[in-house]
Image: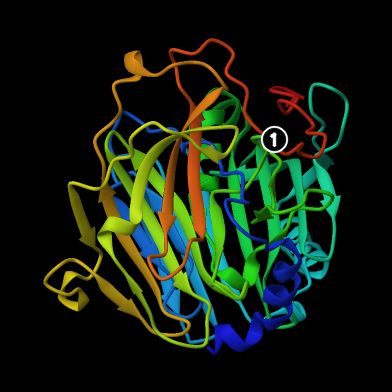
Amino acid sequence: MNSRSCCTIRIATLLIALGAGFIFPSAPWIPAHESVLKDAVYISPTWGYSIRWYSSEWTVVDESSDGKTDRLALQDTLGNTIAFSGSTQFDGDARTCLDDMVNRVLASPGAADPETVEGDIGMLYDSREPEQAYTLMQVRLPVAGVLQDHAVYLECQTLVPGEAVFERYYSGPVGVFDQWYDDIVETLEDVFLPASAWLPIPDAEQQIWMGFAPLSGEWRTNASLLPDEQGNPLLLVGLPDAAGDIRVVTIENISDGPVTINPENFVLSISAMGEEGAEPSQAPYSLTWDDGAKANADGSRQLQPGEIAMVQVAIAAFDESTIKCDGSPQIVFAYRQSESDRVAPIASNPATTCVQAESFEVGAPAAAGRPKLRLSR
């Protein structure tokens, strides 16, 4: 797959959002589960997206690739199934993809009584746009010959414009879905897509997104676009997972030439409203690439055009008791390319010792709220 040529249209669109200096408000921290990183990782061999989960909770029941379609399916002991797929179908159109997913569910032997689920504020979990479409249904499916109510979540996103789509699928008993909602949603959201799937957030300058997460009610904004000195896209830098001092970072070279990634370019600092403050910054005490054999002796790594790499960055936390609360300070994790003065903030959070510290947040679409499932019907 030549993903760089396929994402030209989106990269051109992203140029609108680029400007000088520290311009991208960053995503919130990814919450850590039991303070440990997810120990199971899947990387799509064809499309380059990654998925993370806890092997103690989920078992792989399908993993396949034919050079056009990559599939991964997970199951647990409670009757839940989560599946992901990237494929050259539907010319990259999410609406057509979702229609096909819905038809497949309804065509399942024994499927009956489908209905679209609404949230607790009365909005339906159903949206169909060319680049992202999703629905949450309640449908009766046979289990051991008996019809049982299931929650079925279906979502399609444009993976490569005009070429490929990415699918998320969930199915499980309504009672289990309701009880374990947060854990299920966390696993559905543990996906990091390549640059071809990112776009500027509508009506919000200087931010990019990977779609809207309807079940959590948040934007998928855990990455920044780093421009070069001429303002052209250089790197997509994102945060797929974090726990304690460790942050897992995915870096994609979206430029036309090789780019060297240096450990000292990752930094944890304190800033006020996105502007660099006078407080000290901290560099990594450890950096481990997912394929250490390709790294140089000093820990640096050269990425070729279109190459994607994953690295674990360990930076000691600040003593937040020493942080002054003037100016609504934020603790910012960022990447700074040494050849320029450009910065890609990857994640930020308010200092916990500063009460009601304010931060810039992009308004998300109106979420439907917690799903209202009929546990018996």
Residue 18 pos. (x, y %): 68, 63
Tell me residue 355's x, y (percent): 54, 10
- Image position, residue 39 (x, y; %): 27, 48
Q: Residue at x 57, y 51 (%)?
A: 22
Between 251 and 154, which is closer to the camera in this rendering?
251
User: In the picture, which quadrant includes the C terminus?
Assistant: top right
Q: Residue tagged by mark 1? A: 217
Along the line of sight, the residue nearer the viewer: 27 or 374: 27
- Residue at 85% x, 36% y is 124
Residue drawn at the location 72% of the way across and 39% of the way down = 362
260 up-or-down from 350: above or below: below
Does the rendering let one see residue 173?
A: yes
Label 1 secondary element: loop
- Asked if residue 102 is positioned above or below residue 277 in the image, the reply reads below
**Nearer-the-camera pick, 79 or 133:** 133
Nearer to us in this view, 216 or 357: 357
Residue type highlighted by circle 1: Gly
Task: Give the residue drawn at x 69%, y 80%.
Answer: 89
Residue that lies at the very extreme toward the top in this rendered image: 355
Residue 291 shown left or right of residue 13 in the figure: left
Outermost residue toward the left in this view: 297
Side of 94 where 331 appears, left or right: left
Q: Dot 1, crowdedness within 10 Å: few (<14), some or many (≥20)?
A: some
Where residue 172 sits in the image (x, y, percent)? 57, 40
Residue 109 visible here: no
How many numbered marks, from 0 up?
A: 1
Q: In this view, does 283 lie to the left or right of 332?
A: left
Is 188 rendered above or below residue 176?
A: below
Which picture quadrant has residue 103?
A: bottom right
Colour treatment of the image:
rainbow
